[in-house]
Image (cartoon, helix red, strand yellow):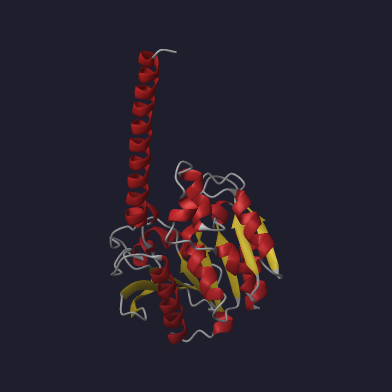
């Protein structure tokens, strides 16, 4: 091989090496960008509510309360209509997008089961102040729990309900505080395991600052657990629910629904609602 040919090969190799270095640098910059701004990719808070439960004919109390780090939070306490006896309170930690305004229909169905329902917004959501984070959401659910107790509900009369992202703070609270029961619907085993599904080209498990490692905590829950999930969930795969369920201790129950992640869950049919009502009957008496 001539010196000229060798020089051409060396030149091409040099160009290829420079290109690879440029691509590696661009990928590193992208990973840094995702690491620094990831909470904008994780949390999707809605604005302050423009309607209230009163617009749906529901009785409610507007509640202002604070987290332990001083962040001001907002919630609604709804009670059953027509003088119906209140046998307990369901503390609802809602899903990622929107605010408590978008959970009024859920609260309406649950108050129909003879329960008070406490809806609250995480920091940065709705009329609550601050910026969302995993540690912040844990403080918020603890403050919401204290607000429920301050309104006369004893721990054995409180049931936790976590919807999707809300399963994280729900599970964290349930392993630290006494409650009558725990319900999680469309909840993931961990946030990185879901993120890796949507961003397979990123090292999500290495970059994630907020992890919500629910599967590592669920075995610490001593209260009865109901896991609700659809095999057709298009955001959080059903395998995540099965992983959570298998890691939990008894007593526990797995309720299969149908449809996509945002298609209504257990509220889609009378049969599914009856199963949830039966669980509430068992834990509240």
Query: In the image shown, does 83 or 160 lie closer to the viewer?
Result: 160
Q: Residue at x 57, y 79 (%)?
A: 179
Q: Residue at point 63% right, 50% down?
A: 239
> With 222 as the anchor, is 150 left or right in this view?
left
Give percent across and percent down for residue 88. 54, 78
Point out residue 84 in the picture as x, y percentages from the top left corner.
52, 76
Residue 243 position (above or below residue 2): below
- Please indicate whether residue 194 sits to the left or right of residue 247 in the image: left
Report the residue at 49% width, 42% height from top: 200
Which of these two is toward me, 148 or 1? 1
Q: Quadrant of residue 139?
A: bottom left
| Left or right for 218, reference 82 | right
Q: Please say whether residue 160 is visible from this viewpoint.
A: yes
Residue at 53 percent across and 45 percent down: it is: 260
Q: Nearer the viewer, residue 130 or 105?
A: 130
Q: Nearer the viewer, residue 259 or 24?
A: 24
| Quadrant assignment for the C terminus | bottom right
Can see residue 262? Answer: no
Residue 19 coordinates in the image, percent (x, y) = 35, 31
| Quadrant for the N terminus in the image | top left
* Image coordinates for residue 204, horizontal then vertical, percent: 46, 51
Give the answer, above or below, for where 238 lies relative to 130. above
């Amino acid at each position: 091989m001539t010196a000229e040919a060798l020089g051409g090969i060396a030149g091409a190799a040099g160009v290829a090496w420079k290109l690879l270095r440029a691509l590696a640098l661009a990928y590193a910059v992208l990973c840094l960008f995702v690491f620094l701004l990831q909470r904008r990719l994780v949390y999707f808070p809605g604005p302050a509510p423009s309607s209230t439960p009163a617009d749906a004919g529901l009785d409610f109390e507007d509640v202002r309360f604070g987290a332990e780090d001083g962040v001001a939070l907002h919630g609604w306490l709804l009670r059953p209509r027509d003088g119906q006896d209140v046998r307990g309170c369901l503390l609802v930690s809602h899903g990622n997008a929107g605010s408590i305004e978008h959970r009024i229909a859920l609260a309406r169905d649950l108050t129909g089961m003879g329960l008070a329902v406490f809806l609250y917004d995480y920091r940065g959501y709705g009329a609550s102040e601050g910026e969302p984070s995993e540690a912040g959401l844990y403080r918020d659910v603890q403050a919401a729990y204290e607000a429920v107790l301050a309104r006369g509900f004893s721990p054995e009369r409180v049931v936790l309900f976590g919807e999707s992202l809300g399963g994280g703070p729900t599970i964290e609270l349930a392993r630290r505080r006494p409650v009558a029961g725990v319900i999680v619907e469309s909840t993931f085993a961990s946030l990185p395991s879901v993120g890796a599904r949507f961003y397979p080209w990123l090292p999500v498990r290495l970059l994630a600052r907020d992890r919500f490692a629910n599967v590592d905590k669920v075995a610490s829950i001593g209260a009865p657990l109901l896991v609700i999930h659809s095999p057709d969930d298009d955001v959080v795969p059903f395998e995540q629910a099965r992983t959570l369920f298998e890691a939990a201790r008894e007593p526990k129950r797995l309720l299969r629904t149908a449809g996509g992640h945002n298609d209504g869950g257990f509220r889609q049919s009378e049969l599914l609602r009856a199963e949830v009502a039966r669980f509430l009957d068992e834990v509240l008496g």
